[in-house]
Image (spheres, rainbow, N blue to C red):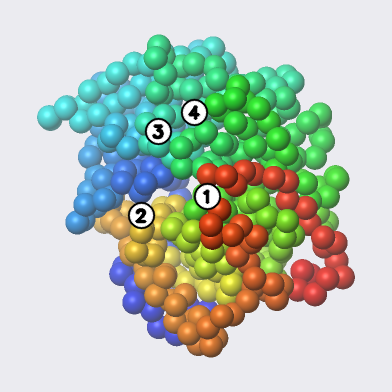
């Protein structure tokens, strides 16, 4: 733990001297945290593997087919327990669903898309659909690859070259993409409404020439995690969807010698973004560490990661526990470390005397009143007040 940190009740978290992280294939978790999938195996003998995470103990099911999968094949879990496979074959992207069938593996071909380049988006919030981005010379196509009536369906065309992909709601309608317009132009996050033909609106406009990317969003609270180089170098910041409050760039999230990436936000904090816990993957010369941070507290805790952690992956449960997938033993057995992050934040808030404010001295709860329906709040552009010369921004 970082100097001065109090002991925590953590299952399967090792000491800093013993901490290791897993390189190679990671894992993808459904939005509800029930299933996960990864490309497992050794050498050239690769196969999809599905993890069940919502039972008393996690367990993995291997889903090998007649031929091993190529390295670079994508897998993505669905909420019904099936796993999507994306294979690249002779300039085409082919899709299949695989699932356990007694002692074997069943496979349902879904068709393909004629393109040499394709990126799967994160799992849809509803768990039933899956989407992909196909970049073109002047625009990026959004394809529905699972959930359509007759195989992959083209659902939207977004001007510019798009990357990333963050869901802004619980229904899978509002999608944020990082868009580059023009060769070498700045990257700005935009909102894409998939139920209105891909209607696009600006989401992040921090500085005219800055690259402003959205990394994570929590639909319950409206908390947004942002990366921007508006200050002349990349900084991690946070804002509130639908609020006129400026984006903040806390000094506690600035680690010059490390790569820092948020990967999970605590759900269920309706209208209270300042109380959301944020889990971060911290990668430096000493290896991977786990970061825990909360806007209202401001302090970044650095903890040793569980041995065998599939670095940069995890999910919060409804009780405020952070669950981190890991593999252990020579056979790569699956496990799930549980960390009582909500309890840690509660103890820290009590130690501060309750009612602590955010780093800027203003309430981070935003301007949405408790009587306003959550569905009424829509994404609007976030603007940053001057990055330099303002207390606390650095």
Tell me the CA gap for discs 3 and 1.
36 Å
Q: Earlier in the sequence, mark 4 or mark 1?
A: 4
Tell me the CA gap for discs 1 and 2.
35 Å
Nearer the observer: mark 4 or 1; the answer is 1
Q: Earlier in the sequence, mark 3 or mark 1?
A: 3
Is 29 located above or below residue 22 in the figure? above
Judging by the rendered image, the residue that carries numbered circle 2 is 325
Label 2: how many residues lie within 10 Å, few (<14), some (14-19) or many (20+)?
many
Nearer the observer: mark 1 or 2; the answer is 1
Tell me the CA gap for discs 2 and 4.
24 Å
Per the image, label 3 sits on a secondary structure element best described as: strand
Tell me the CA gap for discs 3 and 2.
16 Å
Q: Is residue 12 left or right of residue 184?
A: left
Q: Earlier in the sequence, mark 1 or mark 2?
A: 2
Judging by the rendered image, the residue that carries numbered circle 1 is 373
Judging by the rendered image, the residue that carries numbered circle 4 is 131
Q: Nearer the viewer, residue 43 or 304?
A: 304
- Residue located 33% across and 32% down the image: 83
Judging by the rendered image, the residue that carries numbered circle 3 is 75
- Residue located 64% across and 44% down the image: 379
Percent of width and height locating residue 340: 37, 70
Say if mark 3 contacts mark 1, CB within 8 Å.
no
Q: Nearer the viewer, residue 137 or 372?
A: 372
Say if mark 1 contacts mark 2, CB within 8 Å.
no
Image mark for residue 281: none
Nearer the observer: mark 3 or 1; the answer is 1
């Amino acid at each position: 733990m970082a100097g001065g940190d109090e002991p925590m009740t953590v299952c399967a978290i090792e000491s800093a001297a013993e901490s290791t992280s897993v390189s190679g294939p990671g894992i993808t978790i459904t939005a509800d945290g029930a299933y996960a999938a990864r490309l497992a195996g050794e050498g050239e003998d690769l196969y999809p593997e599905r993890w069940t995470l919502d039972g008393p103990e996690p367990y993995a099911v291997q889903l090998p087919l007649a031929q091993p999968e190529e390295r670079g094949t994508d897998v993505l879990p669905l909420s019904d327990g099936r796993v999507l496979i994306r294979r690249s074959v002779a300039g085409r992207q082919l899709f299949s669903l695989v699932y356990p069938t007694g002692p074997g593996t069943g496979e349902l071909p879904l068709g393909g898309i004629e393109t040499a380049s394709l990126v799967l988006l994160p799992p849809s919030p509803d768990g039933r659909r899956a989407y992909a981005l196909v970049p073109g010379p002047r625009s990026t196509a959004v394809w529905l690859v699972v959930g359509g009536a007759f195989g992959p369906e083209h659902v939207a065309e977004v001007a510019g070259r798009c990357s990333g992909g963050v869901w802004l709601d619980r229904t899978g309608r509002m999608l944020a993409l990082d868009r580059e317009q023009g060769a070498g132009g700045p990257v700005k996050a935009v909102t894409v409404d998939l139920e209105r033909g891909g209607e696009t609106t600006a989401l992040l406009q921090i500085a005219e020439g800055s690259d402003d990317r959205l990394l994570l969003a929590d639909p319950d609270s409206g908390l947004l995690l942002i990366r921007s180089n508006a200050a002349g170098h990349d900084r991690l910041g946070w804002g509130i969807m639908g609020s006129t409050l400026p984006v903040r760039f806390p000094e506690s999230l600035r680690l010059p010698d490390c790569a820092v990436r948020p990967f999970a936000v605590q759900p269920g904090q309706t209208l209270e973004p300042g109380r959301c816990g944020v889990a971060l993957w911290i990668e430096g010369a000493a290896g991977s560490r786990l970061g825990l941070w909360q806007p209202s507290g401001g302090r970044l805790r650095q903890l040793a990661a569980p041995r065998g952690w599939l670095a940069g992956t995890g999910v919060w449960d409804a009780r405020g526990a952070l669950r981190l997938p890991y593999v252990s033993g020579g056979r790569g057995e699956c496990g799930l470390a549980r960390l009582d992050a909500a309890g840690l934040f509660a103890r820290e808030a009590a130690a501060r005397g309750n009612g602590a404010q955010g780093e800027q001295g203003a309430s981070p709860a935003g301007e949405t009143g408790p009587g306003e329906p959550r569905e009424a709040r829509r994404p609007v552009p976030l603007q940053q007040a001057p990055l330099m010369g303002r207390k606390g921004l650095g």
